[in-house]
Amino acid sequence: MVIEASEGVALEDDEVKHYDADGACTCGNVWATFSNTFALSFLTVSVLTKVVVYAGIGTVATVIVPAMFEALEWGV
């Protein structure tokens, strides 16, 4: 059985190249692809955690604490 490739379709024997965000070709190196994806997801989680924590600190300082002071009649 002969399989011919149509335009835009890679056959099983054709090498499929994958490029990371920096434009470097991993060329089938599965470990490099996995480690780059894991590092990216870890950095994303780390950054999102910091955004949530710092936004929470700002909310507590500007909304919750003044409301608490007003409720307890500790106004200055």
Image (cartoon, rainbow, N blue to C red):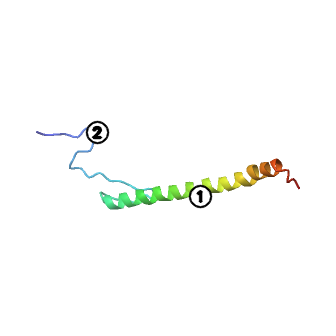
Rendered location of residue 72, percent (x, y):
82, 50
For the point 29% across and 57% down, which residue is it?
Answer: 28
Q: Quadrant of residue 61?
A: bottom right
Tell me residue 19's x, y (percent).
38, 55
Q: Nearer the viewer, residue 61 or 44?
A: 61
Which residue corresponds to mark 1? 50
Q: Is residue 39 left or right of residue 56?
A: left
- Residue 9's image quarter? top left
> From this viewpoint, is residue 25 visible?
no
Q: Amino acid at mark 1?
A: Lys
Percent x, y of residue 13? 20, 50
Residue 41 - label: none
Q: Viewer-nearest of labels 2 and 1?
A: 1
Q: Amino acid at mark 2?
A: Glu
Residue 51 at x, y percent in the picture: 61, 55
- Can residue 10 be seen from the camera position used here? yes
In the rendered view, does 29 fall on the left or right side of 51?
left
Q: Residue furthest front?
A: 72
Q: Secondary structure at mark 2?
A: loop
Pick the residue in front: 40 or 21.
Answer: 40
Mark 2: few, some, or many residues within 10 Å (few <14, many ≥20)?
Answer: few
Residue drawn at point x = 24 percent, y = 50 percent: 14
Which of the pair 13/74 is nearer the observer?
Answer: 74
Question: Which badge, 2 or 1, comes first in the chain's sequence?
Answer: 2
Residue where numbered disc 2 is placed:
7
Residue at image coords 31%, 41% = 8
